[in-house]
Amino acid sequence: MSQSRKSILAAVAVLACAVAVPALHAQMDPEVGGAPMFVSKNIVENAVNSKDHTTLVAAVKAAGLVETLEGAGPFTVFAPTNEAFDKLPAGTVDTLLKPENKDMLVKVLTYHVVAGKVSSKDLVKMIKAGKGKAEIKTVEGGTLTATTQGGKVMLTDEKGGMSTVTIADVYQSNGVIHVVDSVVLPN
């Protein structure tokens, strides 16, 4: 092989690596709410940077759950967007954020958390194994029912409310976040 051909092949290899590494990095650190979600950071460290999750972050702080969600976990969080909170009846969020309603706020937030790291692939396997649905135990102690519809994972809460996973598998150092479009509510 000629020296010039070796040089061209080396240049192509370097170029391929230059393109592949950022692409791999982009898959590992997807953007949520206009901010990259770094796999090296924990759930709270990432969530505070998402402009789509300011209500969730305020609620986590008001509930005193920051330290827990910064812990080792692993946790799976179904993270409602600001728009998801906006779907609740007027005044609901303000009421939940009041110090005297902290217990209720903790109950609602921990209903969005599952112990362990559950990927969307895991959820789909559970749904298939359950012949179309999977019962998921939350940290709050209640149950979410997962199904698929139109290729998306859907969650049904204990009150019959539904939420769709809009962004799946946002990996964190202490678990995984699945962005959802509605707040799910326990009994």
Image (cartoon, helix red, strand yellow):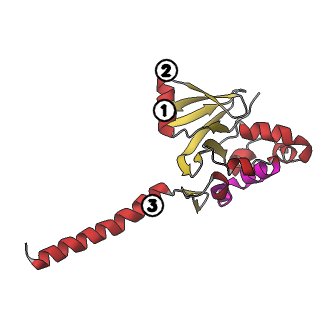
Q: Does residue 41 lie above or below 95 as drawn?
A: below
* Residue ID for mark 2: 131
Q: Confirm or deny contact between disc 2 and disc 1 (CB under 8 A).
A: no
- For the residues marked 2 and 1, what is the alpha-carbon distance in whole angstroms? 11 Å
Q: Can you give x and y, in whole percent of width and height, for residue 141 in the image?
A: 72, 29
Which circle, 3 or 2, is nearer the viewer?
Answer: 3
Q: Can you give x and y, in whole percent of width and height, for residue 21 in the image?
A: 38, 64
User: Residue at left 69%, top 45%?
Assistant: 84
User: Residue at left 77%, top 27%?
Assistant: 187
Going from N to C along the chain, the mark reached first, 1 or 3, is 3
Circle on res. 25: 3
Q: Does residue 101 lie above or below 157 as drawn?
A: below
Horizontal side of 72 relative to 101 (left or right) equals: left
As rendered, which of 89 and 26 lies closer to the eye? 26
Q: Which residues are magenta?
A: 46-62
User: Residue at left 65%, top 61%?
Assistant: 49
**Residue 150 seen in the current view:** no
* Residue ID for mark 1: 124
Residue 105 among those drawn in magenta:
no
Horizontal side of 28 relative to 76 (left or right) equals: left
**Residue lying farthest bottom?**
4
**Residue lying farthest top?**
131
Residue type of the residue flagged with mark 1: Val
Residue 49 among those drawn in magenta:
yes
Q: Confirm or deny contact between disc 1 and disc 3 (CB under 8 A).
A: no
Q: Does residue 8 lie above or below 98 as drawn?
A: below
